[in-house]
Structures are given as C-alpha cells and as structure tokens.
Image (spheres, rainbow, N blue to C red):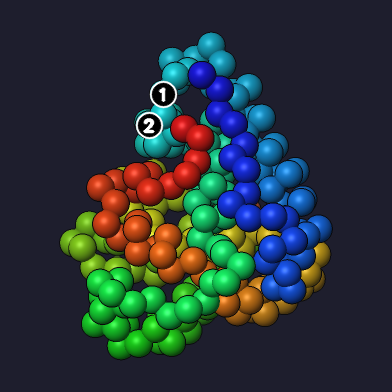
Amino acid sequence: MTFELPPLPYPTDALEPHLSRETLEFHHGKHHASYVKALNHLVRGTRFAGRSLAEIIQTSGPGRLRDNAAQHYNHGFYWNCLEPSGGEKPNGALGEKIRAEFGSVDRLARRFAAVATAQFGSGWAWLVVNADGSLGVEASTNADTPVRTGRTPLLVCDVWEHAYYIDYRNDRGKYVKAFWDLVNWDFVARNLTAVDGVAAVAVAN
Ligand code: FE2
C-alpha cells in the first residue's frame, strides 16, 4: 500500500482572493506532494508498511517517518478545513459548544488568531477536543499533530510560511484573518462527532 496525494476538494483558484492559485499549486502540488513521496520512501520495507497513517504517527517515534506522516495528515486535514464559501458562523451543537466554552465565535476567532500568530517558526494552530471533552486552542511545532496523542482535531490552520508567503509575505496575521473567512464549519462539525481523530478526514490512508 502506498499513500497518495489526495486531490484538493476544490479547484486551485477557488479560494481567491484569500489564497491564490499559485499558493495552492505550490502548497498542495509541491509541498504536500513532497511529504507523501518522502513518506512512501521511508515506510517501504519497514514494519510500518501497510499501517494506517494514524498508526504510524502514534507508534513510530520521533524522526523523519513520523514527521512526513504527520505532515501528510495535517495537510489533508487542512485542505478540508477550507471552502470557497466558508466563513459562515457555526451553528447546531458545534455553535452551542463554542459559545458555551469561549463566550462567542468572535472570541474563539481572537483566541485562535493569537495562538496562530504567536507560534514561533513553523507549525500549526488547532481547535481540538481535549481528553475531558472540552474544546482547546493550541499550537503545534513543525510537523506535530494532536493525532499523535490520540486527540480529536476539529480545525487547523497551517502557519508554515509556505502557506502564506506568496500572498501575504511575512504578514501571518493577515493570512490567519483570511483563513478564518474560508473555514468550512460543516467539516469542523463533522469532526466533533467523529469517533477518533481521523474518522472524518478525507486523506488517503
Ligand atoms: Fe503546509
């Protein structure tokens, strides 16, 4: 079994003007693709061949194999967090939970933006379900992912420079604001009802 680069859930120009076609072509077609290629190379002939992506992330230990597996997972998750007509405020059970725990969606947005912009260097900003069922906003460094510790991610923003440098240069804050206007809240809501951290994720694993 080999891992495959999943197609984007939308055309490469669908997120303009927030994220350009050039950004998506490079981010998906070059960066994400390179993680998949490296993952397949590193897993071949090892005891992890044939294992699921989540299993590799959770059991392989620190190193290039785990990093590339996690980057494949994180990017597949990220693409699904976005949609051209995103940004509508969440409703239903997800909206109620956000308002109960953060006070309002806008307060969550401010917390998320603060965590995303404060992450030093490359990484990811997440909305997750904690072990006690509460919601949490946190950053991870480089390739790390909440899936490694078996927690359920709901939403992620890629804050590696390759995610925004073409469109926003060094202005990560502006990118994060644009990201929020693209959030696919239906995907986030589906993750809230997922049995585990990968159940709702359309990645090839
Ligand atoms: Fe990325």
Does the beta carbon of the residue at mark 2 sit less than 8 Å from ligand 1? Answer: no
For residue 33, what is the image quadrant?
top right
Q: Residue at x 51, y 35 (%)?
A: 204
Nearest the viewer among 118 and 73 is 73
Q: Are marks 2 and 1 in contact (CB under 8 Å)?
A: yes
Q: Is residue 135 left or right of residue 74?
A: left
- Looking at the picture, how far across and down is residue 31, in whole percent? 71, 45
What kind of residue is marked 1? Arg
Q: Is residue 46 left or right of residue 40?
A: left
- Looking at the picture, how far across and down is residue 163, in whole percent? 68, 60
Q: Is residue 148 left or right of residue 163?
A: left
The disc label shown at residue 55, or none: 2
- Looking at the picture, how far across and down is residue 81, in whole percent? 51, 61
Tell me the crowding category of disc 2: few under 14, some 14 to 19, or many 20 or more residues within 10 angstroms, Cα based. some
Tell me the crowding category of disc 1: few under 14, some 14 to 19, or many 20 or more residues within 10 angstroms, Cα based. few
- Looking at the picture, how far across and down is residue 11, in whole percent? 69, 55
Does the beta carbon of the residue at mark 1 sit less than 8 Å from ligand 1? Answer: no
The disc label shown at residue 20, or none: none
The disc label shown at residue 51, or none: 1
Q: Residue at x 25, y 72 (%)?
A: 93
Q: From the viewer's perspective, is residue 35 above or below residue 22?
A: above
